[in-house]
Image (spheres, helix red, strand yellow):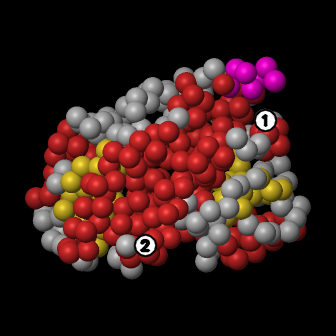
């Protein structure tokens, strides 16, 4: 109980708890902009969508890559900012969308990448929290994510708000009634996800030194995000992999002292993730899983929702657990070592 009270006093906890309200505000204030961008993309019929981001925002971009390719059939790829900022490469990006995702909108390499993409003919779209930032000003289309002031070094509500905007954009681009309805239900579902009890996972990870975090498809981005938060705030060497990719080498170093956290949304990837989880559990490894139906794993409660929404709910539940884990391990999640809120890479 003492750890729970201490966790609740952290900025990271308070800001993560704001995510449902921030998403609600985003839907209320910028739905028209997102609808207009969806119409513009239908007219443009882009031959590719290119993402560019760093840190948690890049994990949101990973989510966008899978959502756009699976729902729109548009080739999507990640472009490292250094292609423009370091190597100064010119490319033909005509009839392409260049999607930048950023909390601060100030990193010089992202600004250079967006500027180069515009010069190369792309439609530059910025999902950004700081509406008055240089990145927002330079983009052809600016979509504020409305996360509000985020002072904790570890991003939480800004990540959820970025994913919300991405899902909403694809729903409008696709004109998908079911997905649009799921977006409208998202704030209430995030509230429910925040209240779920992942204490057993916290207890099991207190003595851990390292773990794998696995997902696939729409769940890969949140696996990457969870692994980053476990590094930043909990002092754990957490490595994210696709549940398929882990079979191609990384599985060799697993042993019973190394737990596994898996995210398993209810879409076409679920059978394969279930199969991987069952195989790992059958070998005596401790597997924790949000979603899915695999036998032999330790289940984490997760609300049922549209498959494109479930990853957002899973990461919201995870954030609460991560804060509690950090505090229980004697760490301050608001002051990670060697980190600051805005990282200005060149």
**Image check: 163 left or right of 40?**
right
The answer to whether the residues at label 1 and label 2 have Cβ atoms under 8 Å apart is: no
Q: Residues within 10 Å of mark 2 (few under 14, many from 20)?
A: some
**Judging from the image, what secondary structure is the residue with disc 2 in?**
loop
| Disc assigned to residue 176 | 2
Mark closer to the chain start, 1 or 2: 2
- Tell me if residue 281 can be seen: yes
Residue 66 against residue 240 in the figure, above or below? below
Magenta span: helix, strand or loop, mainly?
helix
Residue 23: where, in percent of width, then height?
A: 46, 45
Give the quarter of the figure containing the N terminus: top right
The residue closer to the viewer here, 263 or 238, is 263
Q: Which residues are magenta?
A: 1-7
Can you identify the residue that label 1 sits on?
206
Residue 146: where, in percent of width, then height?
A: 38, 40
Residue 32 against residue 172 in the figure, above or below? above
Give the quarter of the figure containing the C terminus: top left
Which residue: 42% across, 38% down?
147
The residue closer to the viewer here, 241 or 21, is 21
The residue closer to the viewer here, 281 or 40, is 40
Which residue: 26% across, 62% down?
37
Q: Residues within 10 Å of mark 1 (few under 14, many from 20)?
A: some
């Amino acid at each position: 109980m003492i750890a729970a009270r201490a966790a609740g006093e952290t900025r990271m906890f308070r800001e993560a708890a704001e995510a449902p309200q921030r998403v609600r505000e985003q839907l209320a204030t910028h739905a028209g902009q997102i609808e207009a961008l969806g119409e513009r993309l239908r007219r443009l019929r882009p031959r590719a969508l290119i993402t560019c981001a760093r840190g948690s925002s890049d994990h949101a971009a990973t989510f966008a890559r899978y959502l756009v390719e699976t729902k729109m059939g548009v080739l999507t790829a990640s472009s490292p900012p250094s292609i423009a900022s370091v190597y100064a490469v010119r490319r033909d990006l005509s009839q392409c969308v260049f999607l930048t995702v950023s909390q601060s909108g100030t990193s010089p390499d992202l600004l250079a990448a967006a500027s180069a993409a515009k010069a190369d003919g792309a439609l530059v779209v910025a999902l950004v929290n700081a509406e008055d930032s240089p990145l927002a000003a330079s983009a052809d289309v600016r979509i504020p994510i409305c996360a509000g002031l985020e002072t904790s070094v570890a991003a939480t509500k800004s990540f959820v708000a970025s994913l919300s905007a991405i899902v909403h954009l694809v729903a409008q681009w696709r004109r998908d009634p079911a997905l649009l309805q799921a977006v409208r239900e998202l704030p209430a579902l995030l509230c429910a996800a925040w209240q779920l009890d992942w204490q057993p996972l916290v207890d099991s990870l207190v003595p851990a030194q390292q773990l794998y975090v696995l997902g696939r498809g729409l769940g890969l981005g949140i696996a990457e995000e969870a692994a980053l938060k476990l590094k930043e705030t909990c002092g754990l060497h957490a490595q994210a992999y696709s549940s398929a990719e882990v079979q191609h080498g990384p599985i060799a170093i697993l042993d019973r002292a190394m737990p596994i956290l898996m995210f398993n949304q209810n879409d076409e990837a679920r059978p394969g993730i279930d199969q991987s989880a069952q195989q790992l559990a059958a070998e005596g490894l401790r597997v924790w899983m949000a979603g899915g139906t695999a036998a032999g794993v330790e289940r984490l409660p997760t609300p049922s929702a549209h498959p494109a929404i479930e990853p957002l709910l899973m990461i919201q539940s995870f954030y609460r657990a991560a804060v509690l884990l950090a505090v229980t391990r004697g760490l301050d999640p608001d002051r990670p070592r060697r980190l600051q809120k805005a990282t200005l890479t060149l």
